[in-house]
Image: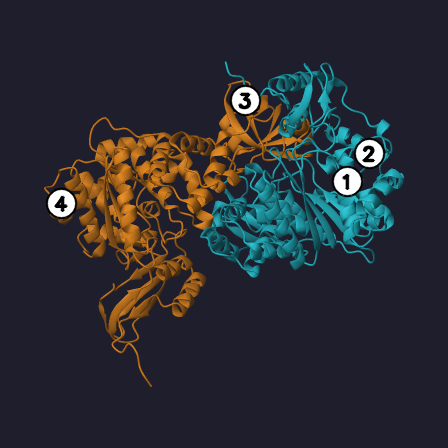
Chain colours: A orange, B cyan
Amino acid sequence: MKVKTFPINAGKLVAILHRTDAEELGLIAGDRVEIINKNNQKKCVAVVDISNYSVVVDQIGLFEEGIEKLGVKNGSKVNVTPTGQLKSLDYIKKKMNGEKLNQEEISTIVKDISDERLSDIESTAFISAIYMKGMDIDETISMTKALINDGNKLEFKKGIVVDKHSVGGVNGRATMIITPIIASTGLLMPKTSSRSITSAAGTADSMEVLAEVCLDTEKIRKITENVGGVIAWGGAVDLAPADDKIIKIEHPLSLDPEGQVIASVLAKKASVGSKFVVIDLPVGRYVKIKDKETAIRMAKKFVQVGKEVGMKIEAVITNGEEPCGLAFGSALEAKYALEVLEGKRFDNLAQKSCELSGALLEMVGKAQSGKGYDMAKEILDSGKALEKFKEIIKAQGGKIYSSEKIQSAPFTKEFKAGADGVIDEMNTKLLTRIARIAGAPSNKTAGLMLYKLVGEKVKEGDLLFTIHAENKDKLIAAEKFAFKNIPFSFKRIIIQTIR
Amino acid sequence: MKVKTFPINAGKLVAILHRTDAEELGLIAGDRVEIINKNNQKKCVAVVDISNYSVVVDQIGLFEEGIEKLGVKNGSKVNVTPTGQLKSLDYIKKKMNGEKLNQEEISTIVKDISDERLSDIESTAFISAIYMKGMDIDETISMTKALINDGNKLEFKKGIVVDKHSVGGVNGRATMIITPIIASTGLLMPKTSSRSITSAAGTADSMEVLAEVCLDTEKIRKITENVGGVIAWGGAVDLAPADDKIIKIEHPLSLDPEGQVIASVLAKKASVGSKFVVIDLPVGRYVKIKDKETAIRMAKKFVQVGKEVGMKIEAVITNGEEPCGLAFGSALEAKYALEVLEGKRFDNLAQKSCELSGALLEMVGKAQSGKGYDMAKEILDSGKALEKFKEIIKAQGGKIYSSEKIQSAPFTKEFKAGADGVIDEMNTKLLTRIARIAGAPSNKTAGLMLYKLVGEKVKEGDLLFTIHAENKDKLIAAEKFAFKNIPFSFKRIIIQTIR
């Protein structure tokens, strides 16, 4: 067949066939064909779409994904053959019917997701099944191993690779503090981070204020070997293609089956060669994990699955009832993390960063048991962590090395306390929402700056928070929302009045 | 924004935005926007795809679906606004978490599926949920009502509308015999049928050998009023758009949640105004319903749900252990049904057709209790049914009125018995498979013709079946498959030998 190219990103591998050809091949829309480029023998599997007029007989329509994968151009000749029924479909159905899957079955599904042989419908049925039926510990281990074997892997000739991961945190960029502390000690920390989905900023968004984060595997390896640490955007590297696709499917309905979260996190860590990992599990009303029991159950699974795939895991349960640091938004959070490194601030974000760093240092034997925190704090206080962070920024092609150089959005509105009191509760979901209405995360300079944390005394007229908006309209929208949805509550002495 | 058109059928409503615009609107891929044509105020909701080069800033890429729905052309101006979070997503999640949905929640989901506001991922999560969690009788009733309210409805000024439906039958075209019998009595039977998905032919495929089946709602109404009956392809009419989409999603994994099957069937019947319906539930090892208990449970639900939506239902459980009639394939099955109407054959297909027709005639009081079968057989034997069928063919623009005018594929291969015996079992799945390898259903003339049914005596050299293939290659492939997978077994006298 002759290729007809369409300069469109379809988001998946699609082949448009004329109805006549489809009928001849016995295909209906949604079936799959294997396409082979006759020139270079490159091949791919695509989902069939049928049209009577987008293509003519003996012509096959391909979008950007197919064009790239096959290395074809308009008019290239390809062979098209129907693929049989995929085994994965039987396994997905098996899981939907409540049966347990073994390693081979899970690996087959992961491979088919990774190679885009499964359609969105089929992949969603699988994710729905593991959400509704759950994965037991064996299946979670199988999934982790399958994801580790999928995609590229980073390997380092020497050095010990360590990492940390927060499950469902909201703000604060501990990674930007922990990575330089750890890298200062000679350990390797090649961190791949995500961008924001529902928060005001992801670590990758925040780091991008200071330096380049779209780094390929080779650059990540090189920078890590040269300076000990890197903070890159995970989406730019092909370390776990199946996992990236699974996350894309989980997103619209916020499906996050527990076993899949564990497998996904550990596989990403394994793909950069991590052997020692601290998992941070914040618990709170407004974060992903709402209760301690869930956190303990997940923590135990992390440790057990980690052991099965050759990783030493320490899972720590942390207080997710208040924000971590006072900033919301890419630039504000970057500035805040830099201020911690510069010694200008020391609060719950700095504390957490030193505790997690300390745990890692003890795990690998860099610090004696019980001395990890002190060692981490000493590295932070001495300015060594700041120097290391500047090296990292430089290695990632950055130019901003000081918190003072970071600009925030020009349209601001201050919110002050209307009465004296003590802050009892902060709703991080509402704070995030205000920051997003102000323009975060797509506008890096937009966000929100807090001045108080839970438990702090406030006097009438004290500054509570400032909104930084990208333009006047967004400022007004964020202001209105904040007035209607106050993200604070004060401690009450009178808890009930009887009349 | 200015429209840029792409002459492609994307299968759903998609809008391509430039990354800059998407960021400005706070959209990520998979989010939804409402698009309004400034000229005619037509609007639609589309799923966002983001590209840096398919479109430029302030341009929106639209595929055929969007172009048609909005009535736009290249360069048209439209307004684009993000839609908020859909309530349906909460309801889908609720069902996934095992909670029961009420009428309003189910109607909201069905409306959003119908209007294409839900993506494939979201719709699949919903179908997966009702497959894995089931729908109880209340939910099934809600779903039926929601599907009835979706799409167009046929209404007739006078006359009683009746219908029949087979759940998961394999071959034989009882509809082509029942419809003319019923229409001869003055009742109305506007039948919408499906095309084949996994079988050798659907009723719509078979009827298409004789007449036009792509009829719109208005034509179906007119023909029914004029001649009493019609056999149209359901896919060509917009009677149940949500149901059509649900079926498209169920297909790749053969998901057919029981409640959804019931709702889907009854809604389709209600949409053409049927008040009396016979539901045929074939039970057998090689058909959809494997055991009598399942059939009885489904039968009861059909009756109960029917009552709730104002329909009188009789559900009959039938023998699905052998083929219904001897033909497999569109033309062969059409020819066979015509031969029954012409009085040239009377076997299990004819018998079933008269029994089901009889049940309908008794339900509406056209025949006394216990006399329906006789009345139906009399209509068949007298030739009235044949005359009525010819009227239907004519009204649907057909030109073939005699079984002798129907051609079958020219490449044939006969299979004969290698020994004497009695046929004990026939595997209708294998028979279907052979017919499909020979070219069915895309080639109408291809298929398979049987000469014996279960229980019949066979002598060595007797003809068992003939393959009709569309070309020599397919004949050889079908022959090979049939030799390896013999679709018959003979009764054995010696059931075990001890040596």
What residue sits right under mark 2 in the picture? B340
Label 3, on which residue? A36
- Tag 2, which secondary structure? helix
- Looking at the picture, which amino acid does disc 3 mark? Ile
For badge 4, the amino acid type reads Gly
Labels 1 and 3 in the same subunit: no
Residue at position x 24%, y 53% in the image: A318
Name the residue beneath numbered marker 1: B353
The chain ID associated with circle 1 is B
Residue type at mark 2 is Val
Q: Residues within 10 Å of mark 2 (few under 14, many from 20)?
A: many
The answer to whether marks 4 and 3 mark residues whose Cβ atoms lie closer than 8 Å is no
Q: Are marks 2 and 1 in contact (CB under 8 Å)?
A: yes
Toward which corner of the image does residue A398 lie, by quadrant?
Answer: top left
Where residue A446 appears, as percent x and y from the top left, is: 37, 56
* Residue A288 image offset from top left, x and y in percent: 35, 53
Label ID, residue A372:
4
Chain ID for label 3?
Answer: A
Task: State whether discs 2 and 4 lie on one chain.
Answer: no
Q: Is residue A412 visible?
A: yes
Image spot of residue A170 (x, y percent): 32, 54
